[in-house]
Amino acid sequence: MLNPALVLIARYFSLSRHASKAIIMKPQHSGENPGGNSAEMPRAKARNLRFALVTCPSLVLARKIARSVVQKRLAACVNVVGTAIESFYTWKGKLESAHEHLLLIKTTSARLPQLEREVKRLHSYDVPEFIALPITEGSADYLSWLCESTAE
């Protein structure tokens, strides 16, 4: 059986690798941007959006971090992968493994420093995973919502 978290991540990376071929659908709004390229608006918004990955040793901690960063508007949305993933890594020169829960965090580039500080503040690891990737494409409505949800 395939791990649902790995399938989700594989789909994300597969989609982002082929982003130049993506078709962006934008609802038509009368009177807005007449004659303009509707695909440019989502691309412009996406330039400042980020997708952050964080792993946690427990579902309780994953949910605590997710709630905190959304309540503080450091992220618009956090998906908590409830099925544990298996991680292999070296720590202090030794091969280690752990079962962890993955957070998929959607935010803006402006919020990344604050988001990272909050994750580090709440996390139990000495060096928590915090990786941010650019969001290159998406639906205009979703990207607008993401920007509005993280606005100060």
Image: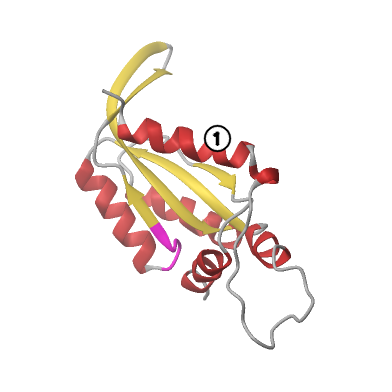
Q: Residue furthest top?
A: 94
Residue 24 screen position, x and y as percent: 62, 58
Apparent side of residue 143 relative to residue 117 in the rendered image (left or right): right
**35 relative to 81, above or below:** below
Apparent side of residue 86 relative to residue 50 in the rendered image (left or right): left
Quadrant housing the N terminus:
top left
**Residue at point 38% right, 60% down?**
69
Q: How many marks?
A: 1
Q: Is residue 128 magenta?
A: no
Residue 123 screen position, x and y as percent: 33, 44
Apparent side of residue 119 relative to residue 133 in the rendered image (left or right): left
Q: Nearer the viewer, residue 78 or 72?
A: 78
Residue marked by disc 1: 14
**Residue at point 31% right, 34% down?**
4
Q: Secondary structure at mark 1?
A: helix
Q: Residue furthest left?
A: 60
**Residue at point 24% right, 36% down?**
83
Q: Quadrant of residue 94?
A: top left
Give neighbour class at mark 1: few <14, some 14-19, many 20+ (Cα, 10 Å).
few
Q: Nearer the viewer, residue 58 or 80?
A: 80
Q: Amino acid at mark 1?
A: Ser
Boundaries of the magenta span: 73-77
